[in-house]
Image: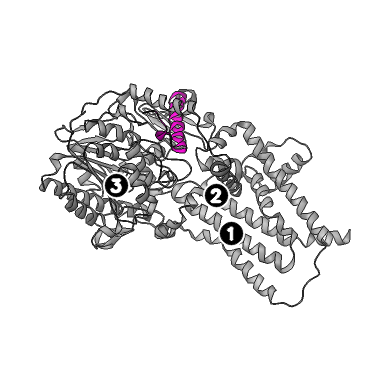
Amino acid sequence: MKTAGKFLLNQWDYALFVLLLLGKVYYFSNVSDTVFTTLGPFAFVGELATWAFGGNSDGIFEGVLLISIGTILLGTFWLLLLSGRKRLFWMAITNLVLSFIILADTLYFRYFEDIISVTVLMQMRQVGDVGESIFALFRLSDALLLVDVIVMAILWVMISRKKAIAQAPSRWAKAGTALVVLMLGWQLTTVPFNKSMEDGGAWQFNKLISNMRVYNFTGLLGFHGANITRYIDDNFINRKVYSEDEISEAQDWFDGRNAERVPGPYSGMAEGKNVIVLQVEALQNFVMNREVNGEEITPNLNRLARENLYFPNFYEQTALGRTSDAEFLLNTSLYPTAEGSAYMLYAENTFDALPSILKEQGYGTNVFHPYKPSFWNRYIIYPQLGIDRFYSEGDFDEAEVIGWSINDEALLDQALEEMAGFEEPFHSQIVTLTSHHPFEMPEDLQLLNTEGYNGYQDRHFKNYLQSIHYVDRAIGKFVEGLEQKGMLDDTLLVIYGDHSTGMTANTKKFVEFTDSKDPLAYFETNKNVPLILHVPGAEPKIFSQVASQLDLAPSLLDILGGDPGQHYFIGRNMWEAEDGRATFRDGSFITNELSFIAASDGIYDNGSCFWRITGEEMDVEACKEPFKEGSKELQISDDVLRGDLLEKFEP
C-alpha cells in the first residue's frame, strides 16, 4: 500500500499537465464565448461525485467541461506508460502540438468565428500568405498558451543533463494506471456525447452545418478527433455514392425551381453588352451614405447607388472560403460547403457556371486578381468555371503594395487598360484586395478625418474606414475611366461586397457606429453588403427586397438575355420581391419579414425568430417554413458538390 501510494503521488506531473491543457481549452471557450460549464469548481466536483455514484446531476453536462476532461485523458493516457526523461520529453512534445492546435484555433476563430478542420489544414500552404493578418489577431493573453511549453522544454534540458536516474516503477503499475485513466477518459467522453445526441444533437452532428455546432457536442480536442475520423470515413472508408434515384431527385428539384422562374423587368436589356463584375474585399453596406466628421466615407459608391440600381438589403453567404466563396456563389449559384472552401475541395467538379454560359454565347471570359494564382486553388478551378484567362500576380506592372498586393487603384487602372483592348463582348471579374483585414493603410493615403475614432481596441475599425474610403476613390476613378473610354454605355457593371469585415460584436466602435447592440441588429448588419448594378438604359431605382449572392447568376443572366430556366441555379431572380430570402450556411436566414438566428447547438427550437419590421422576437414556429426551404437548398447544393451530380444529370 505504501509503495502504491508513493507511485500515485509521483503522478503529480501528469495531473498538472492535464490541468494545464484543461486551462487552455477553457481559454478557447472564453475567446469563442461558448459555455464551458455553468458550475463553479467545487460545485462541479461535488455534482460529478454525485453522478459517479448514481445520482442525478445534469449540471455537469451543461457546457463542454466534462467531455473536455475526457478527451484530454483519452489523448494523453499513454504518457503514464512512460517515466523519467522519456515521459517529460513526450509530455513536452504533446504539449507543444496540442498548444499549437489550440492557439491556431483561437486565431482562426477570431477571424472566421469557426474552428480549423482537416480540409482547411489542406490549405496550410496559404498560411504564409496571410501572415500579417494572422499577426494582427494575436493578443498578449495568447502567450499563456505557450509559456508552459517553454518551461517544460527548459526542465527537460536540465533533467537530461543529470546522470542519476530514479528507479522506474514496475510495468504493471504503469500499465494499470494508464488503463484506469483510459477507461475514465472513455466514460467522460462517451457519456456526455451520447447524452447530447439523445437530446437532439444527432442530426446537427451528422449534417455538419458548422464546425462550432460540432464543438458544442465534443469540446475542442474532441472536435478535432471527430473531424479527422469523419474526414477519413467520408473520403476513404464510406465515400458517398449517389444512386440513380437520388440523382434523379436532385435534377427534379432543379426542374421545379426552374418552372417557377419568370423574366425580370430588365430581361434582355443588356443582351450582347460587356460584363464587368467588381467584387470588393470586405465592403459592407453600413458605410454607404454615412459620414465621419461631416465627410462621406464612400462618396463615389453613394453616387453610383443613386444613379443606378441599388440593393441595400443584399446579403453575403460566404463560409470558410470567404472571398473564394463569394466568387463561387456569384458564378455557380450554389452554396459554399461547410467543410472548407469549395474552390479547394471540388475544383475538378462539373459546374453550370455563368462564365461558361457566357463563353458559349461568344464572350471572352477573364479574371483580374493581383495575387498568387495558386491561392484558393484559383488556377485549377477557373477553367472549370469557363474562365479563359486569369490575370494574376505576375501579370501586373509594379506598383505600391498595400496589404497583400498592389493597391486597388493600380489594379483597376491596369485592368481597365487591358479591357479596353479586348474583343467584345467580354466578361471580366475583378477581385480587389486593398481592403483586406487588417485594413492597414499608408499614412499618406489615410485621407478620411477619423478624429475621435482612435483607441487600440478599435484600431481595426478606424483602419477599415480609411481603407474603404481609399477603395471608394479607386472605384470612382475606374468608373470615370470607363466613361472616358466610351465603355460604360456598353457594359453591365456589377459592384458588390464579398463578405463581412470580420469585426465582431466586441468591437465597440463598430457596434456604436452601426447601432448593433442587440443580436438581431448585429446579425443583419454583419451579413449586409451592398449591390449596385449599372444596366445601360435603366432608370435609377432602389430595390428594398431581400436578395443574396446566390441570386446573382440567374439575375445577371436574365439581364443579358439568357434563360436561367435552362440551367442549374439554386438562386432566384432578384426581382421577385415577395420570395426574397437569404439563407446562410448554418441555417440562419433573412426574408423581407423574418429573420432567424440559428442556435449554436443546432437545435431548431433553440434558435431565435424575429419580425424584422418591429424587431419583436416571435415563436420559432413562425420561421419554420423558410427554414425548411433553406435547409433543402443547402442539402441539394451539398449533394451536387459531393456527388458531382451535374455531370450525372440527364441532358
> Neighbour class for label 3 at 10 Å: few (<14), some, many (≥20)?
many
Type of secondary structure dominating the magenta stretch: helix
Q: What kind of element bears circle 3?
A: strand
Indicate whether residue 434 is drawn in magenta. Answer: no
Q: Disc 3 vs disc 2: which is toward the camera? A: 3
> Neighbour class for label 2 at 10 Å: few (<14), some, many (≥20)?
few
What residue appears at the point 44 percent right and 56 percent down from the top-left corner? 137
According to the picture, the residue beneath numbered tag 1 turns out to be: 97
CA–CA distance in space, label 1 to label 2: 21 Å
Indicate whether residue 647 is drawn in magenta. Answer: yes
Query: Does any portion of residue 133 appear in the rendered image?
Result: yes
Q: What amino acid does circle 1 point to?
A: Val
Is 288 located above or below residue 632 in the figure? Answer: below
What residue appears at the point 66 percent right and 39 percent down from the top-left corner? 192
Highlighted magenta segment, given as a residue range: 623-651
Evaluate if marks 3 and 1 touch, with contact meaning CB atoms under 8 Å apart.
no
According to the picture, the residue beneath numbered tag 2 turns out to be: 30
What residue appears at the point 21 percent right and 49 percent down from the top-left corner? 475
Q: x, y (%) of residue 492?
A: 20, 38
Q: What amino acid does circle 2 point to?
A: Asn
Asked whether 340 or 469 is in front, the reply is 340
Q: Quadrant of residue 148?
A: bottom right
N-terminal label among 3 and 2: 2
Is 84 located above or below residue 265 in the figure? Answer: below
N-terminal label among 1 and 2: 2
Q: x, y (%) of residue 429?
A: 26, 45
CA–CA distance in space, label 3 to label 1: 37 Å
Q: What kind of element bears circle 2?
A: helix
According to the picture, the residue beneath numbered tag 3 turns out to be: 280
Quadrant where the N terminus is found in the figure? bottom right
